Image (tube, helix red, strand yellow):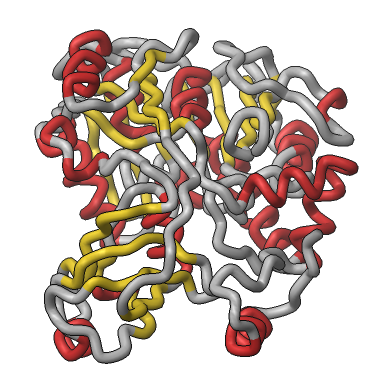
Amino acid sequence: MYVLIASRSAIAKDLADTKSPHAPQSRFSPDVFRLTEMVYGGDTQSVLETLSEPVSTYFVRCNTLKISPSELCEGLREKGLVVSQHAIIPEALGITVEGPEHVPLAGKRVVVDKNTAESVLQGANVYAPGVINCESVRFGDEVTVLSEVGDVLGIGRMQMNANEILTFRKGLAVSIEKRRYKAPQIRELTEYSEGLLYPQSIAAMTASRVLDPQPGETILDMNCAPGGKLSHIAQLMQNSGKIVGLDRNAEKIATTRRTIAHLGCLNVTVSIHDSRYADVDLASLKPDRVIVDPPCSALGLRPKIYDLTTQRKVSDLAEYQKQFVKAAAGVVKPSGVVVYSVCTYTIEECEGVVEFAERECGLKLIEQSPRVASNRGGNIHASNRLTQRFHPVVDEIGYFVAKFQRSSSA
């Protein structure tokens, strides 16, 4: 059973007080537990346990601007990966993740931060910025990689010494040789370097498909970084029409530009802009369709080493998300389409935003296709079958998608 915790310092104290590298079992704040229970009721325990584990199928999107799904499948299988093509979204390729396997303690220890630990569970190596503690390690040492709460993540070989890691804070620190989960190292594949695929969840691909962009249309992506949905939309439009991507962070825009160039997207323009004001600043654009994928609590993403999200943060995020939806409703052309998606499951960030969109923004919830989410389980799923809710256990991600149409007279 989960024992709820209140702060990150409590995790550190528990870790210091225990001899077990797997303690504490508790991963989630009281607010996360309550927010989850509001949605999933009696399934809460199962949902939280599942959120702490990696997915069993890791999805990548075939870049059909450069290669067909069947060709990419064949190439990945030749590398020994177990790959299958999704039955509904043909460009979605699922790669099987094996595990968990027991990884014994060995050699010296390297402790990594939350984001790095979660990346290691998904197949990544350890890079210097993510190292918290590395004792007196030297180049070539065999080390056990631990999360900051004591999870044994894998055994690896040092590629740097402790002084280099702590002084320069960049570069490959540990090459993982044995892992709890055998996940594909996507970014080390030649197919990735050649821009033939892009790592993306099946839920995120569903959101772009639900938008249903058509060749020749004008599309606005209001939260475009790092370019996943933006590049997917470009390939669905076969590089025709016009796509505008916005983000107010210059560094994120630079990353997005690299993404679209790498994948061969030719009909995309990205700009540094706070899209909450798109209805005023870009009033003349009048896009046919707008996709809104704003910052959210990300409670639906797996795996989680821990999550200490508070109710206050969720409420603040919901109000923030509403600003983007309001701007989208104002900028989209009359009768145009707005798709809203978030990688979370809280009622405030999902149904709460939908209610606001219909009540305050002149948007009407409409049927969406394709239907990929199971919409199973929980206390509220039956309330609106027009939306899609991805279940963290059944669908391996917590995610929400809503599709709206603007009034023709707005």
Q: Residue at x 46, y 31 (%)?
A: 57
Q: Is residue 360 above or below residue 133?
A: above
Q: Is residue 22 above or below residue 274?
A: below
| Whether residue 360 is visible | no
Q: Nearer the viewer, residue 341 or 73?
A: 73
| Quadrant showing the C terminus | top right
Q: Position of residue 105 (x, y in %)?
A: 42, 70
Q: Is residue 41 visible?
A: yes
Please tell me whether residue 53 is drawn above or below residue 269 in the rendered image: below
Residue 375 x/y as whole percent: 73, 24
- Between 380 and 312, the one lying in front of the other is 380
Q: Quadrant of residue 314?
A: bottom right
> Residue 223 at x, y = what percent?
43, 45
- Viewer-closest of 372 and 189: 189
Residue drawn at the location 76% of the way across and 44% of the way down: 46
In front of the other: 324 or 285: 324
Q: Position of residue 186 (x, y in %)?
A: 26, 40
